[in-house]
């Protein structure tokens, strides 16, 4: 006991005069007293720990009495913990309480268990987050698919793969967490369902192959009837295209688009009509396209597409995807709007997110004076084609701008254009619509600036992405040509791109224009025909 309580850093026991140090005597006495007290404790069955616990549980009165008691105890030199023994000299508590406290340890195992539980919870939360991101996109696609909003559905499903790829890139190629974040064939199957309504069979077949991969698509879709039908269309198209490759190349090599050059190309086309493997419907479609491209006689053009319609129906196969939009356009030009709307209904019933047929129907209704139908059509389209819950898609803006402009609400149209350009600065349709507004207002310089900008954006899209549809569209060409001609005739020609005015006019003079467009461009027809009759709104 003496040895245990002895402090090796205390003063030496024997002093220089040979006497025993006073500290040592005190320590020995304290130890002896405590040993005697221990014997008493053992005889009565009490331990120091029991006494300490009783002391901890004692209820102390008000603060004044507590302070008074503590002061009294300190005066008496009692241990503040057990309040029965004297405080060891140089210590805070008595010898027994000091020894009891030294045996209490931090529960290390408990701390480790708590830490592991926390880490496990964080891991589970991470897994849930990784899984929910693709899941939400899938749910969005499912809702759109149920509404036949196919383009929105396809976009949502496509973003699942993109989201998965981004997460896996963040985690790293070798991360075991990648096993919890996958796209799988289930998502690809949903994408295929959306694709089948959005695209024609040719592009459906191509995109399905891209989505699944060539080997997987042949295996996974081997028993899918529609995919096999798309494959048959694709093979027939490839064979027919190879047969007519020579006249198509001739078209590309010709510098001028004139009726004379057109007759030369058409004669070569006719030689290919009956070659083995040539699909008559697909051939008729290309034949109509050539006649339209070279501006041949209107009756001849109409006859060609009517023959196409007859040949298509005779096959018993659905070729509506191939030519209904073009057929509707020709009918609208000839004021056979009701017939055109029936064709367009087939396309929009298949996919309510189909932009071109919807825009053509809106134009048809406005030309008939049925503005309420046009407004309802645009409202329904926009409601079903939002980019998200609060943001319009780029095609929504195009229709909203067109509707406001066509109804003479130019200020509203300008406001929508400004908003649209903030979100989608590379959509050429916004600048084209802006050009038409400036034309109706008589601001021919700004009309040319906007039309030229639209053409440049469309050209960049064609150059970088290979999508030439808008750049070669009739509505863009009409808008640029009319804007350039009227700017030359009546404009100040002091804008940024006025230096290109003569070059643009020279290029478009080679086109065999419809007489209506020529009359508008030369100022012989009221420019507001663009608004009321939609001279520049063909899709």
Image: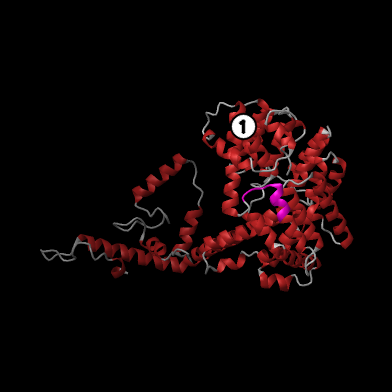
Q: Residue at x 64, y 37 (%)?
A: 481
Give percent across and percent down for residue 187.
70, 62
Number of numbered labels in the structure image: 1
Q: Residue at x 23, y 63 (%)?
A: 9
Relative to the observer, which residue lies in front, 100 or 396?
Answer: 396
Which sits in the foreground, 201 or 303? 303
Bounds of the magenta segment: 255-264
Task: Assign the magenta stretch its main secondary structure.
Answer: helix
In magenta segment, residue 46: no
Query: Dot 1, crowdedness within 10 Å: few (<14), some or many (≥20)?
Result: many
Q: Which residue is mark 1?
A: 447
Where is the C terminus found, in terms of image quarters?
top right
- Residue 18 to residue 534: above or below: below
In the picture, measured across the screen, residue 110 lies left or right of residue 291, that is left
Residue 269 picture location, percent across and down: 74, 59
Which residue is rendered at x = 85% and y = 51% of the image?
306
What secondary structure is found at the residue carrying circle 1? helix
* On screen, residue 396 above or below 240: above
Please indicate, yes or no, whether residue 51 appears anywhere in the rendered image. Answer: yes
From where the camera sits, is residue 194 visible?
no
Point out the image quarter for the N terminus. Answer: bottom left
Horizontal side of 246 relative to 94 (left or right) equals right
């Amino acid at each position: 006991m003496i040895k245990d309580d002895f402090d090796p850093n205390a003063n030496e026991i024997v002093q220089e005069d040979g006497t025993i140090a006073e500290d040592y005597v005190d320590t020995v006495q304290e130890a002896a007293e405590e040993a005697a007290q221990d014997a008493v404790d053992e005889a009565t069955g009490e331990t120091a720990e029991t006494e300490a616990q009783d002391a901890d549980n004692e209820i102390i009165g008000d603060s004044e009495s507590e302070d008074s008691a503590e002061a009294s105890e300190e005066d008496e030199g009692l241990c503040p913990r057990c309040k029965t023994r004297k405080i060891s000299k140089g210590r805070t508590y008595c010898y027994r309480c000091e020894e009891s406290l030294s045996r209490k340890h931090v529960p290390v195992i408990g701390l480790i268990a708590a830490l592991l539980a926390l880490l496990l919870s964080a891991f589970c939360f991470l897994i849930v987050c990784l899984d929910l991101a693709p899941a939400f996109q899938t749910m969005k696609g499912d809702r759109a698919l149920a509404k036949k909003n196919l383009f929105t559905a396809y976009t949502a499903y496509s973003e699942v793969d993109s989201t998965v790829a981004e997460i896996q890139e963040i985690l790293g190629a070798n991360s075991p967490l990648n096993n919890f974040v996958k796209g799988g064939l289930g998502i690809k199957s949903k994408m295929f369902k959306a694709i089948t309504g959005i695209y024609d069979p040719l592009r459906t077949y191509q995109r399905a192959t891209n989505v699944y991969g060539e080997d997987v698509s042949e295996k996974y879709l081997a028993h899918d009837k529609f995919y096999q039908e798309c494959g048959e269309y694709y093979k027939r198209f490839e064979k027919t295209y190879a047969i007519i490759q020579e006249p198509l190349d001739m078209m590309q090599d010709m510098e001028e688009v004139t009726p004379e050059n057109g007759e030369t190309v058409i004669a070569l086309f006719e030689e290919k009509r009956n070659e083995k493997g040539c699909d008559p419907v697909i051939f008729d479609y290309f034949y109509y396209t050539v006649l339209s491209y070279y501006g041949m006689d209107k009756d001849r053009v109409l006859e060609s597409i009517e023959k196409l319609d007859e040949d298509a129906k005779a096959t018993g196969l659905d070729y509506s995807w191939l030519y209904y939009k073009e057929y509707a356009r020709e009918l609208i030009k000839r004021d056979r709007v009701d017939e055109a709307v029936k064709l367009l209904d087939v396309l929009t019933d298949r996919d309510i997110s189909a932009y071109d047929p919807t825009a053509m129907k809106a134009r048809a209704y406005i030309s008939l004076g049925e503005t309420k139908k046009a407004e309802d059509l645009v409202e329904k389209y926009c409601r079903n084609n939002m980019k998200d819950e609060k943001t319009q898609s780029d095609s929504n803006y195009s229709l909203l701008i067109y509707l406001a402009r066509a109804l003479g609400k130019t200020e509203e149209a300008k406001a929508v254009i400004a908003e649209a350009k903030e979100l989608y600065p590379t959509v050429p349709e916004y600048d084209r619509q802006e050009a038409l507004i400036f034309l109706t207002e008589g601001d021919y310089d700004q009309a040319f600036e906007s039309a030229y900008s639209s053409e440049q954006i469309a050209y960049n899209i064609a150059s970088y992405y290979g999508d030439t549809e808008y750049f070669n569209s009739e509505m863009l060409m009409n808008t640029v040509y009319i804007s350039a001609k009227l700017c030359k005739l009546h404009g100040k020609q002091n804008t940024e791109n006025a230096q290109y005015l003569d070059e643009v006019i020279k290029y478009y003079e080679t086109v065999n224009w419809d007489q209506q467009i020529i009359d508008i461009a030369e100022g012989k027809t009221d420019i507001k025909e663009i608004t009321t009759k939609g001279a520049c709104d063909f899709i």
